[in-house]
Amino acid sequence: MSSSQIQPGLLRKMTVRKVLECLQEQGPLSRAEVTRETGISAPTVSKAVADLLDSGLIEEGEASGNVLGRPGKLLMLARDSAQVIGVVLDSQICSVVTASLAGDIDSQRTVTFSTPASYGALQKQLTEIVQDAIHGANALTLGIGISAPGLQDGERCLFAPNLQAINQQRPAADLSQATGVTAFCMQESRALCMAERLYGKARGMDDFAMLDFTSGLGLGVFSGGDLMQGHNGLAGELGHITVDPAGKLCGCGNHGCLETLATDSALAGMISERLGRRLTVTEVIEQLQQGTLQAAEEVNLVCEYLAIAMAAAINLFNPTTLFVYGQLLSISEGTVEQVVRMTRRRTLDPSFQACRIEAAETTKQHAAVAAVVHNLTRAAGPRVAE
Ligand SMILES: [Zn+2]
């Protein structure tokens, strides 16, 4: 489709999206710099900027640090006039954060709580905390993002093996209705991918993968500049591949799934079982580092299966970078080396050679923020085809 065949309204929205993405990728810029970076004419950029200022997504301000030779007035993602709220739903601990449109989380206002057993209790607690976050700020709340585990079909949670209370529920619709602010729900591995792309080390990258091995094991794939979805948004469930047919019962009902052997929770679970007392993965890592706990056998086993997961992700999707998100790699310097060595052994060499393995820079809290920012960005207009 040539641009002359596109309706003027649509073309304007495409420009809005392009200008917004330019500011997301490059940070604060003057109007002249936006014109240069996007290759769009100055009058068209001005119209798009006016739309973005109206929507509250961006604001105009002074450059922080006042760099010599730079124009004073810069366009930037909203930080004072507007905010977004991120909600992390997880098996043990949930959290609610507020952030600027540039993804800066206000840590003073972060609220965490133990995940309630029922959906009703979860919804009630979330509504109260989110209402406080909306009304306790001077800024306008533009949206709420929810990062949730498991499978989702549109806005409905279909099946979350590690958080069954949300099965068949619509947390985004319910939270929108309770608070009057639009909420968006996103599968957590995909939201992590978006967070790394928007705020982390994957800025500007079009082909990368994100392996989350915290409570469950999930894979998000960013391919050709977009998130891989699958037929109806269920792709990436690497955690439920059977690797031990006679293995432990998984939250999904199957036995011996990869996520029962290759995650932070799997490690904490194995050690807790042997000791006869419940330890979190944070406690396990602390005690290993202090030398008050010996668990070479369990650490080895979990690393072995984590390497299988990493090799599978690299062999299947040929990413330029595989980001890994989980705590157990921080046990020691040696743990990372060991897992990378094991991964190398199990990956086809050309694919391994083409792929960097890096720790993710962003967190699930950033992921929840990215879930809302990604949806607000999409709502601003369709992407210009390259
Ligand atoms: Zn499973």
Image (cartoon, rainbow, N blue to C red):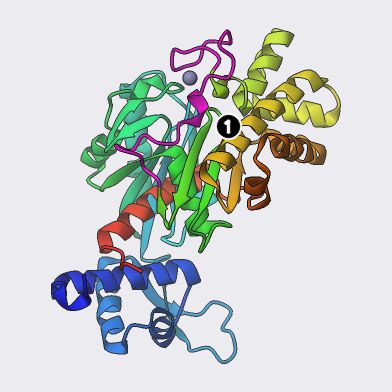
Residue stretch in magenta: 228-256
- Position of residue 379 relative to residue 358, above or below, is below
Q: Is 102 positioned to the left or the right of 323 in the image?
A: left
Q: Is 14 positioned to the left or the right of 23 in the image?
A: left
Q: How many marks?
A: 1
Tell me where residue 267 appears, x and y as whole percent.
Answer: 67, 22
- Toward the viewer: 8 or 70? 8
Asked whether the viewer can see residue 324, the reply is yes
Tell me where residue 223 appears, x and y as whole percent.
Answer: 45, 52
Q: Quadrant of residue 9?
A: bottom left
For the stretch drawn in magenta, what is the main secondary structure? Answer: loop
Report the residue marked by disc 1.
Answer: 214
Secondary element under disc 1, as helix, strand or loop, is loop
Say whether residue 343 is magenta: no
Tell me where residue 282 appears, x and y as whole percent.
Answer: 68, 30
- Position of residue 324 relative to residue 194, above or below, is above
- Toward the viewer: 166 or 267? 267
Residue drawn at point x = 58 percent, y = 19 percent: 243
Which amino acid, mark 1?
Answer: Thr
Task: State which quarter of the image contains the N terminus.
Answer: bottom left
Residue drawn at point x = 62 percent, y = 21 percent: 261
Q: Quadrant of residue 51?
A: bottom left
Task: State which quarter of the image contains the C terminus.
Answer: bottom left
> From this viewpoint, which residue is outermost toward the bottom?
69
Asked whether the viewer can see residue 137, the reply is no
- Position of residue 356 relative to residue 88, above or below, is below
Q: Residues within 10 Å of mark 1 (few under 14, many from 20)?
A: many
Tell me where residue 265 appears, x and y as whole percent.
Answer: 60, 24
Q: Is 59 positioned to the left or the right of 55 in the image?
A: right
> From this viewpoint, which residue is outermost toward the right?
291
Mark 1, ligand 1, within 8 Å: the answer is no
